[in-house]
Amino acid sequence: MSFIPGQPVTAVVQRIEIRKLRQGEHLILGFSIGGGIDQDPGQNPFSEDKSDKGIYVTRVTPGGPAEVAGLMMGDKVMQVNGWDMTMVTHDQARKRLTKKNEDVVRLLVTRKSLEQAVRHSMM
Amino acid sequence: MEGKEEISDTDSGIILHSSPDSPTTIMKDVITHTRAVKLKHKSLEDRLELCLLELRKLCIREAELTGRLSADYPLLPGEKPPQIRKRIGAAFKLDELSIPQGIKDSELNSVEAELSLQLQIYEAARKLCREEHLSKAVKKSRLQQCKCEEKKVKQLQESAFQLRLQHGRSSPRPSCISAPRGLGNSDDSSLSDSVLLDEEEVISQSSQPSVETTPSREPTDSPKPLPGPSPSPGPIPHQPPPAIPTLEELQSSFKDTLDLDLPPIEHSPWTESSLDQPYQKIKRKSRSSSCKSSSPAVTPVLPPVEACYGDVALPLPLSTHLRLCHTQSNSAPTTPEMHVRRQLSLRVPNSDPPLNLDKDRGRARIPRRRLVDYMVTPPDERGVYGNPAYHSNSETDDSNSEHSAPSYTSSPCREASYDLPRQCQPAYRYQQSSDKEHNSLGSQAYPPGPGYHLQPPQQRSGPSFYRDYYDDGMAYPPEMDMARLYHGHPAPCHSSRYEHWYEAAPVHPQCAVRPLPPHVRLSRAPSLREYSQHPPRGLPRQVVNEELKSWHQRNQFRPSSLDRQGAVRVRNIPGCESPLSQHQTYREQVPQRQVFQRAANTIPVQWFKEDDSEIASQV
């Protein structure tokens, strides 16, 4: 998942729709994110390109809404409800994902296995 | 061209003229003169022709580069514009450094070399792609080629990265980022310089995607221009070797550049955050608190002091808000007891009757007021109001206002009341357990336990208190803490409190002036009860003083957390000199803590609502 700044990014993405779980006053997404342009990308254990400052899924709660929706640990979040997630700070990403008034978040995620699958199918 | 005919005509004319002998000298003069002029004319015309020829060449060259024939191309009448084939700058030079030297890391090196070549190829393909004036079919095929190249680049990058990892060099790859840039530069210059560079030794790689084969290490001196994708007659313009940094170079310099020009946003360590909690502005510091909701276990562990401080920063906005509403409580010095007692009720809506405000203000300005506050707990005063719950308020004025407070609370609280459970959570948490009167909805949802370490006010206000707590190593029920707090400090606290007060007062007189909202004290009642039940366990005064002092100092030393929060800064009151100083003074005020607590747990937007709701719950 490398890209050239200023150039359009091509990625094989999967559309994932997470229905937030309402628990009392909380909306539960069932996953954790890491990364963002304000974090050290070199420490990201999930990215292939260690300069990638994208938002990555670092944990998926078993049985949680995210897992049900098909989100997987290590996925890179490209968009949330149409908002770009490849050039945002960690907090911005969190904000987008945890909006109180949105019960559903639609993610575009990309992951290695997806790309490989597509690549193999093309070869 | 017409010029030629003219010339020839004139030539003949001259001959004609000159041949007959003309008797008059004047005539001769004229003749020689015209002759000279004509000669000059001819030379000029010759030059013009040369220029036109040159122009034609240039136009064609330009057309080869741009793909379009310039309108300046001098066409002879009836002549058709020449067919021009565009040439792509397909030649480039790779840095020697990127070409494997020696045997070590041979695999990695070769992959890198391939990668750098592939990058160039990709770049060329991309340019072809962007070319205008193409038929659809051509465009499509070029797009495909481009994508194909891109894929290869990615593959190579991947494998290079893997290799790098294997070799223990996990440094981020600059190549993918910077190489294209370098390419772009070189490309631009190549257009103009290409002629000069033709003789340069270059490794050229055709831009044709199908030539993927083995672009790898060619010795630098073997020029090997391959035909571009569109067959182009004539020489292929070569790209200059210029500033394409090698991968290695880039890599080595990458770290340097990182140091030199840091990105506008500073890197913080890579963290992950669970999305199961509501969004909070404070991320790092309050993280411990944010975890609370998810882990309901009763943890006796209090957050580190720093964490508390970080939390402290939050309340600022709220407190300012309070101030604006005139609801700010008197800036009571930060005594643990006071603080605990008032926690619940600090948030007073604008509903305060003007009368009370005036009274409070008048008093607040003077230290005496504080004295009154501190007197709070003397047992003898309890009897005055008959209600044990209220006995804590030694100040008659305040207590009066308290009693009346419920009636003051205005509509907003009721409106917001539906929000109660959430709003109440932090502030009420420990009160809930102790406070039977306020069985707030939040209590069920949030067991008192987890609230412990979340409650900044307690910890902040009374370091001694929570230290005790630690020492004992047990988790006390909330009531216990409170009780202890009360018992421990009553006498010693007064003195220390005064110290604080005096320090703070001169700096921020405005803070001091704020009257305490009447019903603030209502909330404390339970704690007082507790207090009465537990035998006082006096702490040596010295100890308490020390604690308070050290705590105070600590407060002053921790500016950073505040600055980090954009929200806090934004909401600063203009009147205050600096967020920091303001913050400190605020901390000493009881209400802030409460605010803070709440802020940490909830979204800023909801604060106002919460206030209202809180009030409502009290009522």
Image (cartoon, grey):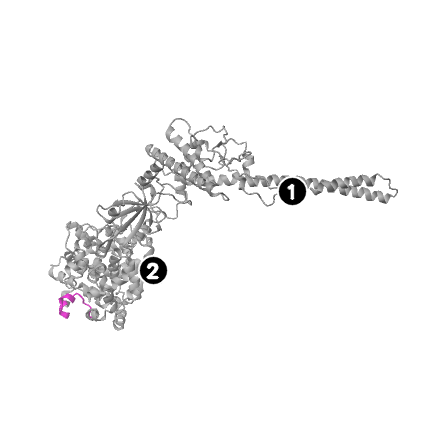
Q: Where's residue A47, x and y in %?
A: 32, 41
Pick the front one: B12 or B61: B12
Q: Which residues are magenta?
A: B382-396
Report which residue position mark 2 lands on: B572
Three-letter amino acid code at the position of disc 1: Leu
What's the mark number on residue B76?
A: 1
Q: Where's residue B202, x and y in %?
A: 50, 31
Q: Is residue B385 magenta?
A: yes
Q: Where's residue A43, x and y in %?
A: 31, 41
Q: Where's residue B356, x and y in %?
A: 25, 71
Residue B585 makes an appearance in the image: no
Q: In the displayed structure, does residue B34 sit left or right of residue B552?
A: right
Three-letter amino acid code at the position of disc 2: Asn
Which-is-in-front pick, marks 2 and 1?
1
Q: Is residue B344 magenta?
A: no
Residue B437 makes an appearance in the image: yes
